[in-house]
Image: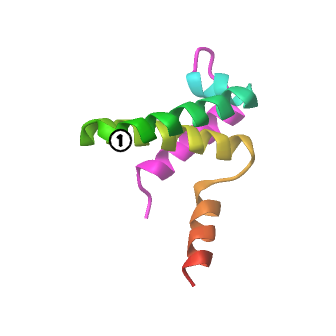
């Protein structure tokens, strides 16, 4: 079953293979350190939102974090399926 995260992962992979001028995703993929910085920033923003902001704000920040994690995975040649497999392994 494909979901929005799978679709987003495919878009990120496409940007990795065929960078589009002006694409934020392509820019991140061209600079691994920038991806790491953004993952850290977004993680902190999720924490801060979880501490005292609205549920909607938590959702928005979690979406930003998930996007940047998917970019990091693609940069490293990994995918959401690799994370799913690890979660399944831990379940047993």
| Residue stretch rendered in magenta on the structure | 1-23
Residue at (58% x, 21% y) in the render:
23
Q: The N terminus lies in which quarter of the figure?
A: bottom left
Q: 92 or 19: nearer the eye?
A: 92
Left or right? Give the position of 42 relative to 71: left
Q: Is residue 5 magenta?
A: yes
Quarter occupied by residue 81 = bottom right
Q: Tag count in the figure?
A: 1
Q: Position of residue 51 (x, y in %)?
A: 35, 41
* Horizontal side of residue 17 vs 44, given as left or right: right
Q: Main secondary structure of the magenta part?
A: helix
Relative to the observer, which residue lies in front, 24 or 33?
33
Residue situated furthest front in the rendering: 51
Measured from the top left, where is residue 91 in percent x and y? 54, 79
Name the residue located 59 percent from the left edge and 14 percent from the top edge: 22
Query: Residue 83 at what x, y percent from top left?
Result: 61, 61
Which residue lies under the disc numbered 1?
Answer: 51
Q: Check disc 1 and report its element: helix, strand or loop.
A: helix
């Amino acid at each position: 079953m494909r979901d929005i995260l799978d679709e987003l992962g495919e878009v990120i992979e496409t940007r990795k293979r065929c960078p589009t001028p002006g694409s934020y995703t392509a820019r991140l993929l061209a600079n691994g350190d920038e991806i790491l910085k953004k993952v850290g920033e977004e993680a902190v923003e999720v924490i801060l939102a979880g501490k005292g902001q609205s549920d909607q704000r938590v959702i928005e920040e979690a979406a930003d974090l998930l996007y940047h994690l998917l970019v990091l995975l693609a940069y490293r040649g990994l995918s959401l399926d690799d994370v799913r497999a690890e979660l399944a392994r831990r379940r047993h």
